[in-house]
Image (spheres, rainbow, N blue to C red):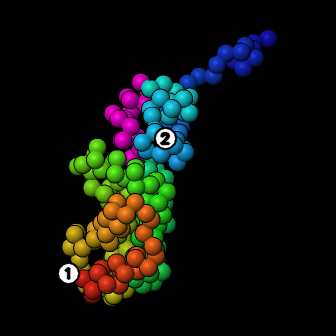
């Protein structure tokens, strides 16, 4: 009778491709949440993912790129963007989600990533560019007739998230709902209406 690998006591085949990458990204996220950006090491991620450092470095050139991939993987998917029926509530909801993610990953991580990846826009760090979060929210408001397309520039579109980032990076604290509402009501909405 032929024995299978488990019966022979052999180690199962190695994970490859998407399965391996998912395990590494999950391990990086878990390490980030447990020890923070400053204490995070590729060695600990490799141990946690049950792989080796060279395997990780073949996929990501440094820990910052791996952390960025883990952050982007753990953001809400684009189909979960707010759609409350009005621009103000959508933007407040979107900023609250961004604020929660910033709180979760911490200002130290954001500082670290921005210092090592200076060419990476903050919106990309939060995955907003890939998901088109703010443009989607703004396009819905245009379709509802709340705002005019001509008033929306790329800088204005980025402004609310940039202001949240600024608040957190300066204070090292999560941004309060009151501050988010001030950003939306006193700065952003007057620019787009």
x, y (%) of residue 42? 44, 32
Query: Foreground residue, 181 or 53?
Result: 181
Quadrant hosting residue 137: bottom left
User: Looking at the picture, how far across and down is residue 174, in whole percent?
Assistant: 44, 65
Mark yes or no: residue 132 visible: no
Q: Is residue 133 left or right of residue 97?
A: left
Between residues 17 and 103, which one lies in front from this camera angle? Answer: 103
Left or right: 64, with 176 as reference point:
left
The x, y position of residue 161, in whole percent, is 34, 67
Q: Is residue 58 magenta?
A: yes
In the displayed structure, 30 sits above or below 133; it is above
Q: Which residues are magenta?
A: 54-69
Residue at 33% of width from left, 33% of height from top? 61
Magenta segment's dominant SS is helix
* Above or below 7: residue 49: below
**Residue at position x 40%, y 49% in the image:** 109
SS state under label 2: helix
Of labels 2 and 1, the one closer to you? 2
Residue annotated with mark 2: 28
Q: Is residue 151 above or below residue 40?
A: below
Residue assigned mark 1: 150
Residue at disc 1, secondary structure: helix
């Amino acid at each position: 009778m032929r024995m299978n690998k488990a019966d022979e006591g052999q180690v199962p085949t190695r994970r490859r491709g998407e399965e391996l990458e998912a395990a590494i990204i999950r391990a990086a996220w878990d390490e980030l949440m447990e020890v923070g950006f400053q204490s995070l090491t590729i060695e600990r991620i490799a141990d946690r993912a049950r792989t080796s450092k060279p395997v990780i470095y073949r996929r990501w050139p440094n820990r910052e790129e791996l952390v960025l991939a883990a952050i982007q993987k753990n953001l809400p998917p684009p189909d979960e963007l707010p759609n409350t029926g009005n621009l103000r509530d959508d933007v407040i909801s979107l900023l609250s989600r961004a604020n929660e993610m910033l709180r979760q990953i911490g200002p130290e991580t954001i500082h670290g990533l921005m210092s090592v990846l200076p060419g990476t826009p903050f919106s990309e760090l939060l995955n907003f560019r890939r998901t088109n979060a703010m443009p989607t929210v703004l396009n819905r408001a245009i379709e509802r007739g709340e705002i005019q397309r001509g008033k929306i520039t790329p800088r204005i579109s980025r402004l609310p998230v940039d202001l949240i980032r600024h608040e957190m990076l300066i204070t090292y604290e999560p941004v309060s709902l009151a501050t988010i509402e001030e950003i939306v009501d006193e700065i952003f909405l007057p620019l787009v209406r």
